[in-house]
Image: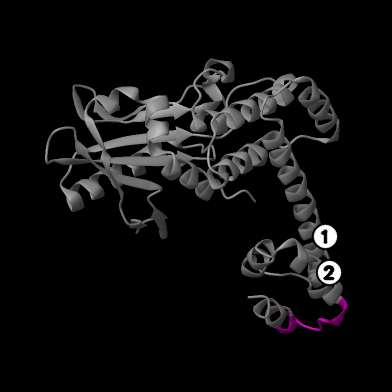
Amino acid sequence: MIDHERLFKELIQTFFWEFIELFLPEVLDYVDKDSLTFLPEEIFTDVTAGEKRKIDILAQVKWSGEDRYFLVHIENQAYNQKEIERRMFHLFHYFARLDAKYLLPIFPIVIFSYDEPKRPEKSQYSVNFPNRKILEFNYHAIQLNNLKWRDFLNHKNPVAAALMSKMDFTPAERVRVKIECLRMLVTLQLNPAKMQLISGFIDTYLKLDATEEEQFNTELKQANLVEEEQVMEIVTSWMEKGIVQGEQKIVKRQLKRKFQNIDATVESRINNLSPTQIENLADAILDLQSLEDLSNWLDQQK
């Protein structure tokens, strides 16, 4: 399972102003960029549904030239839901709760990042009666699968480099999109940690099959990218990551067969093992007699 929430949160928090510049450049005209603060994670309880919901991103910023603040609330909608309007009611619910707590203006943004359907989503939630409008709640909607990836090729923006992998393109364009994401990434001259964040995002959402990988490697050699060394480092890291993930799958499948099942917590701990530790676990499986043995083995890897 892809942890969409974590990936988008890391991307936007790391490149917050680049995100705003890409999708809401007008905000830069009235904000103090040096005032950015990410507020602590908010958790709201939906009593009727019996579940808890975390706010994805909540940022506090100052109005330019003033000693006043406003909030930017960003939610990522990674899965299409049948009652999408009801989901937007929950967004309004969060808006009201945040308004009551902070007493500050709030700019709500929703990123629709699922692949299907591609019908345009609304940017408003309203409640109407025949002769009266009771509620009109507006939010800024960014629907990635309705954005043409080619429109972002010249932005030289790290968020564009990452999110082109989630935009609208044909199956035949998959290899070309990945190469162009890579081309943009290596020209941005980011530090290694930021480079890895974006390259990992691209490779997660634009995973190529064997035929596409062959085409990718062929076209990459013909692309004449100036930063060839950086390109090869990124591609090599993608390959190594793919090998490690394949080894993880094999080890987890063997453990599930041996112990009937393993819970999500154990799977998560295995996912966090280094390549060497994965190899050691593969060797140790025959000696593990119980889930307790497995847990103890994992404890020893800290």
- Location of residue 92 (image quadrant): top left
Coordinates of residue 229 in the picture (x, y in percent): 71, 35
Q: Is residue 196 magenta?
A: no
In the picture, measured across the screen, residue 178 lies left or right of residue 86, that is right
> In this picture, is 134 found above or below 239?
above
Circle 1: residue type: Ile
Q: Is residue 77 visible?
A: yes
Whether 289 is among the magenta residues is yes
Residue on which the image places disc 2: 282
Give the residue number, with chain letter if any, for mark 1: 250
Q: Looking at the picture, does residue 197 appear above or below residue 119?
A: below
Locate residue 4 relative to residue 221 in the image: left or right: left
**Relative horizontal placement of residue 217, taking residue 167 as reference (left or right):** right
x and y, in percent, of residue 134 in the image: 20, 31
Front position in the image: 174 or 196: 196
Mark 2, secondary structure of its residue: helix
Comparing 171 with 135, the one in front is 171
Q: Position of residue 287 (x, y in %)?
A: 85, 82
Residue bounds of the magenta highlight:
286-293
SS class of the residue under badge 1?
Answer: helix
Whether residue 122 is visible here, answered yes or no, is: no
